[in-house]
Amino acid sequence: MSAKDKIDRTKLPKHIAIIMDGNGRWAQKKGNQRIFGHQNAVKAVRETVEGAGEIGVEFLTLYTFSTENWNRPKNEVDALMSLLVATINSESGTLLQNNVRLKTIGDIDGLPKDVKKNLLELIQKTEKNTGLTLILALNYSARWEIVNAVKNIVSKSKTSELEVDEIDNAFFEKYLNTYGIPDPDLLIRTSGEYRISNFLIWQIAYTELFFTPVLWPDFRKDDLYNAIVDYQNRERRFGKTSDQLKDS
């Protein structure tokens, strides 16, 4: 039985988030520069998007470029930005054909103009699609998102009356980039690292974490499906006991 056949379609994670890690190490193992790994990671993205869409996952968030990634060597960052534009353009037809809606989180105003332009154009082209929602985290970090939310709340308080008691979880979430998007049920990190790396810190409070040694360029549909099977074998209690879940 294949990994896909083991999946219970009635208990799918609604939202899967992925930290795509290991491109550089994959390239170095093959005696190439790091950008070679990024170039070969496009197939992993394509397979993951297709795989999630095929089984009915509703939301897929990919950690594409963090605010900390600007600290990498300039030639690598420049190559990544060029690759991002090329990938957006080349994959646009596939997204439309597969009914995928594209969204983004992060400070896209801080991206190069051509990247932002191509990104916004594709978001507009796919906005009426009703299948999988693909969310690219670009120039994103969780700390930036939280600080930005606080700034916006403070700004609101200067222009209108705001009572302290109004600020609860639901209120705060309205100021996050992910407002209107359900929290991830499953977070996958590739390459064998066991870190969150400043990704969706608020949103993953009760997310199930899955770590795999597979380097991202080698990640395929079966790897995604195996992670989902593992997820479905877990008990999600959200602070309750097992007995409480049985009684509910």
Image (cartoon, rainbow, N blue to C red):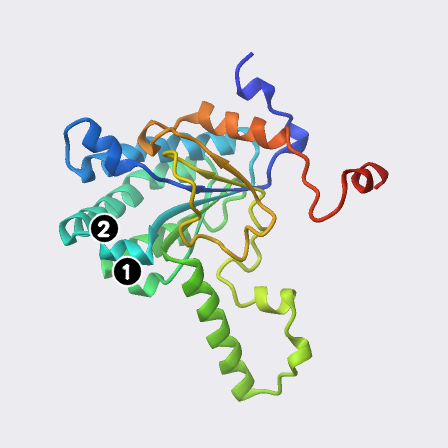
Q: Mark 2 sits on what residue?
A: 81
Q: As drawn, is 138 to the left or to the right of 35?
A: right
The C terminus appears in which quarter of the rendering?
Answer: top right
- SS under mark 2: helix
- SS under mark 1: loop
Q: So how many labels did they put on this image?
A: 2
Measured along the vertical axis of the image, is residue 105 above or below residue 185? below
Residue 45 position, x and y percent, is 37, 35
Three-letter code, disc 2: Met
Quote the CA–CA distance across marks 1 and 2.
9 Å
Lower sequence index among marks 1 and 2: 2
Residue 159 position, x and y percent, is 53, 88
Three-letter code, disc 1: Leu
Mark 1 touching mark 2, by CB under 8 A? yes
Measured along the vertical axis of the image, is residue 22 above or below residue 29? below
| Residue at the top extreme of this rendering | 1
Residue 65 position, x and y percent, is 33, 51
Q: As drawn, is 83 to the left or to the right of 164?
A: left
Q: Mark 1 sits on what residue?
A: 111
Measured along the vertical axis of the image, is residue 213 above or below residue 126? above
